[in-house]
């Protein structure tokens, strides 16, 4: 199945692409090439959409679901963190009361500078 066919089977977006990366620290990481993915509890973009950060374009290449339990050290690095533990700490600090549940599904948005 091609990425285009996969894209057609995705549910509607729950938010707009301009809300995908909003934290100043994360914007800086994206621009520096240190962050190439963003995980959210909803779908913010379609593959092919362009996100503009500080006047620079970033194209979303892939959008798919993943459980938190499937995350690896490599995934955490793509999020701009040194390792999975530092990513977990950041996410839990941003979402007070959230628990890290391995079965929790998130939407992964992978992007690159256009």
Image (cartoon, helix red, strand yellow):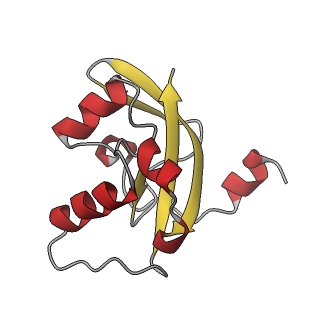
Instruction: Pick whichever, 66 or 114, lies toward us.
Output: 66
Query: Residue 106, how many percent across, how many down?
Result: 46, 67
Residue lying at 17% horizontally and 36% vertically, measured from the top left: 24
Residue lying at 62% horizontally and 62% vertically, measured from the top left: 10
Query: Residue 39, how many percent across, how many down?
Result: 42, 56
Relative placement, left or right, of 92 versus 43 is left
Residue lying at 29% horizontally and 55% vertically, measured from the top left: 86
Residue 50 sits above or below residue 96 on the image: above
Residue 42 sits above or below residue 69 on the image: above
Residue 3 sits above or below residue 86 on the image: above
For this orientation, the residue located farthest to the right is: 1
The quarter holding residue 8 reads bottom right
Relative placement, left or right, of 22 versus 68 is left
Query: Residue 80, how many percent across, how many down?
Result: 36, 41
Query: Residue 4, how many percent across, how many down?
Result: 74, 46
The quarter holding residue 88 reads bottom left
Residue lying at 48% horizontally and 48% vertically, measured from the top left: 45
Instruction: Pick whichever, 96 or 69, lies toward us.
Output: 69
**Which quarter of the figure is the N terminus placed in?**
bottom right
């Amino acid at each position: 199945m091609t990425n285009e066919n996969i894209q057609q089977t995705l549910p509607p977006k729950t938010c707009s692409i301009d809300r995908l990366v909003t934290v100043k620290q994360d914007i800086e990481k994206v621009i520096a090439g240190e962050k190439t993915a963003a995980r959210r509890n909803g779908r913010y973009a379609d593959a092919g959409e362009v996100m503009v950060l500080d006047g620079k374009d970033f194209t979303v290449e892939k959008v798919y679901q993943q459980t938190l339990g499937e995350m690896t050290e490599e995934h955490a690095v793509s999020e701009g963190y040194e390792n999975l533990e530092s990513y977990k700490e950041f996410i839990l600090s941003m979402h007070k009361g959230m628990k890290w549940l391995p079965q929790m599904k998130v939407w992964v948005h992978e992007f690159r500078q256009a």
